[in-house]
Amino acid sequence: MDPAGTIVFTTVGRPQYGFDLFSLELCPSTTLNSPEHRLTDGISINFNAQFVDDDQTLVFISERTGSPRIYLSRPGVGTYPAYTSVGPIFGSVKATVQIARMEFDPVDLDGDCEDIKCEMKILTREETGNNAFPSCSPDGKFIVFRSGRSGHKNLYIVDAVDGELNGGLRQLTEGPWIDTMPHWSPNGDLIAFSSNRHNPNNVDAFSIFVIKPDGSGLRRIHVAGLEGTSDVDRERINHVCFSKDGKWLVFTSNLGGVTAEPVSLPNSFQPYGDLYVVRVDGSQLRRLTWNGYENGTPAWHPNDDHALDMGHIRLGSEVGGDMLKGEFDDPLWISCNM
């Protein structure tokens, strides 16, 4: 069965659009020419989108007012909280970054007020270094996140309500490498993450790993080729996210190589940011986007009984449902014998 649903993601550095949210609808006929829909206004920084409230509300961070604020689009049902990181998440292991839990009343979304009251609770201790990329378990009881508190960036699990101050904390992975960007599967049996543990000395080569929440069953998902081949060890895979049925993973990667002249995009060329999907066993790899920019932090909406009207999410009067094709028109590299 082919993957289905709508993926919302951030595109970093696309000229004329800034750091914006886009959507891409998956279907059996999805190709590199499938249209991307721009959801935000192109003049600000928008990132870290996630679906909450029975997948009917999109929560994301935007700097459209000059400083980071939390935004919600389309009222939903339920009282599920959202989670975020507060601080410079790409800083050193010692940089102060904390995991925060945000709760809001969905009833407030029905009014005309632009500012919705939100209660924020910090879940990690201030002196514990760089804590980032939280992902909640499907039962809402725990958060998996990346932390640099040991001197290395590994994964930890913390109580989703009381945090490490009163609810407890345990280390999930450990080692002199980088384990990062975890995502909890919808049925709670696996946590997918990016890591360079197969080659800790190379900070540019990340691959997909999965592990059970109790720390057992660690395995690598070989995407670019068979285990032991040269191609698979050049993978640069980040922003891993499960589909809602737990059978597929969407991620960003360098698997397409350099297909355009970097000189044409001197300030924003990113040869590792196209979106791909693959089955959890590493089969049926499919490329979704084709451009020279960085697509990341994807969120996967199932498009099942709760179909999402993406038109209601679009922000800004100038957006109007722009459609951009997922292709890259700059010249390809040409090689020949002279």
Image: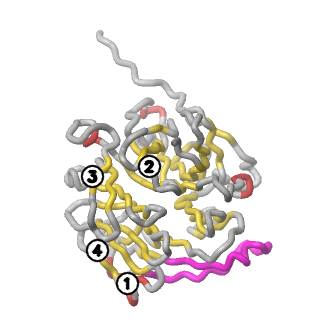
Mark 2 is surrounded, within 10 Å at the Cα level, by few (under 14), some (14 to 19) or many (20 or more) other residues, namely many
* C-alpha span from label 3 to label 1: 29 Å
Q: Which mark is residue 224?
A: none
Query: Badge 3 is on which residue?
Result: 203
Instruction: Decide if residue 300 is on the left or right side of residue 285.
Output: right
Residue 268 in sight here? no
Which badge, 4 or 1, is on the more N-terminal residue? 1
Query: Badge 2 is on which residue?
Result: 251
Query: Badge 4 is on which residue?
Result: 171
Residue type at tag 2: Phe
Quadrant for residue 232, please give it.
top left
Query: Badge 1 is on which residue?
Result: 164
Quadrant for residue 53, please give it.
bottom right
Q: Residue at x 59, y 41 (%)?
A: 27
Residue type at tag 1: Glu
Q: Residue at x 56, y 60 (%)?
A: 49
| Span of residues in magenta | 101-123
Q: Does the magenta stretch include residue 285?
A: no
Q: Where is residue 292 in the image (x, y as percent from the top left)?
A: 48, 38
Q: Residue furthest right?
A: 112
Residue 317 against residue 337 in the figure, above or below? below
